[in-house]
Amino acid sequence: MNENEQDSESLDSFRESSAFELAIRTAESKAAILRILHAYDLTEEDFTNRFPVLAEWVQGLPDVPDEAASAA
């Protein structure tokens, strides 16, 4: 593997990581977080261990979006 290929892989990894963090930060509920984790093939335990700051932030989210809660 040459240096350019390695840089390209690092960039892809950074892009994917950024997309993941953005998806987590813009989720409106814990249910949405579970869908995101599933899409990235992460368990809740893996998420908590690998992304402790995001996992702590997620704790403040409602279990369901406000719209679903008000419709019930």
Image: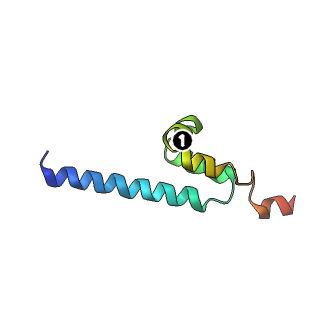
* SS at badge 1: helix
| Residue sitting at x 70%, y 54% | 61
Q: Is residue 60 left or right of residue 19?
A: right
| Residue sitting at x 55%, y 48% | 53
Measured as percent of width and height from the top left, residue 42 is found at 51, 40
Q: Is residue 40 above or below residue 68?
A: above
Camera-nearest residue between 23 and 53: 53
Measured as percent of width and height from the top left, residue 69 is found at 82, 58
Q: Is residue 20 above or below residue 46?
A: below
Q: What is the residue that sits farthest to the left in this orientation?
A: 2
Number of callouts in the render? 1
Q: Is residue 16 left or right of residue 47?
A: left
Measured as percent of width and height from the top left, residue 22 is found at 51, 60
Q: Is residue 32 above or below residue 51?
A: below
Q: Dot 1: within a 10 Å radius of its alpha carbon, few (fewer than 14), some, or many (20 or more) residues?
A: some
The color scheme shown is rainbow
| Residue sitting at x 36%, y 55% | 14
Q: Quadrant of the N terminus?
A: top left
Q: Quadrant of residue 70?
A: bottom right
Q: Is residue 21 left or right of residue 15?
A: right
Q: What is the residue that sits farthest to the right in this orientation?
A: 72
Measured as percent of width and height from the top left, residue 26 is found at 59, 62
Q: Quadrant of the C terminus?
A: bottom right
Q: Circle 1 sits on which residue?
A: 47
Q: Give the residue type that dot 1 points to.
A: Phe
